Image (cartoon, rainbow, N blue to C red):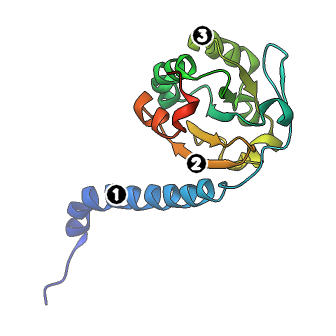
Amino acid sequence: MPRRGPRTWLLALPLLLPASWWAATSGVRGWVNVQLAATHGRLLDRPLRDTAGHEWGPAELRGKTVVLAFFRSRCESCRAEREAIVALAGALDPQRAVLLSVMMDAVEGYPQDETARTLATLGYRHPVVMADAALVDAFHGSRWAHVTPVTYVLDGDGRVVTHLRGHQPLATLAAALPADALRR
């Protein structure tokens, strides 16, 4: 059997590096998906305060479908999803559903001026909650706060019933909701 020299390995390197990267990222994605799926059934049992100072407590949200759209600065997928999130906010029946965007910047340690610029750029008119580690830990974990965008749908009892990971179009976001959550 002929001996393979260093040149053979150098030729194989362009194939091995992308394959190794793909395997590593696939493994991490798979693990994160398991963590996200484990949130199903979890209860939102704490009040959330939005940037306008309004408190969204469990009693106020009871009976409504709640959409929690986690996002952060430095997330191109979050910016790409902006149009769908804005459209979803307008499509929800306010008597039956509420959309709360949840900004992860503080958990990630981003500077406040960067957070302010991101909020100004996105221009959301629906409520935005500034997440802390405890809120993120109640969902997919503060160690994975950089995994955005992630959208959770909670039922009328405040329990997670589904999640969507990554940039989603409006049709996919709307399909994750009960039909009565949308305006007719």
Task: Name the residue at the left extreme.
Answer: 2
**In what quadrant of the picture does the N terminus appear?**
bottom left
**Percent coordinates x, y for residue 78 in the rendering:** 52, 28
- How far apart marks 1 and 3 lie (CA) works out to 40 Å
Q: Callout 3: 10 Å neighbours few (<14), some, many (20+)?
A: few
- Residue 82: image tag: none
Q: Amino acid at mark 2?
A: Thr
Which residue is pictured at 51% across the width and 44% down the height? 165
- Label 1–label 3 contact, CB within 8 A: no
Residue that mark 2 sits on: 162
- The residue at 44%/28% (across/down) is 170
Query: In the image shown, does 119 or 38 lie closer to the viewer?
Result: 38
**Residue type at mark 3?**
Gly
Residue 47 visible, this angle: no
**Residue 114 picture location, percent across and down:** 67, 17
Marks 2 and 1, how far apart at CA: 35 Å
**Which mark is drawn over residue 17?**
1
Along the line of sight, which residue is nearer the eye, 32 or 143? 32
Residue at 65% across / 16% down in the picture? 126
- Report which residue position mark 3 lands on: 123
| SS at mark 3 in the image | loop
Q: Earlier in the sequence, mark 2 or mark 3?
A: 3
Image coords of residue 77 (percent x, y): 48, 31
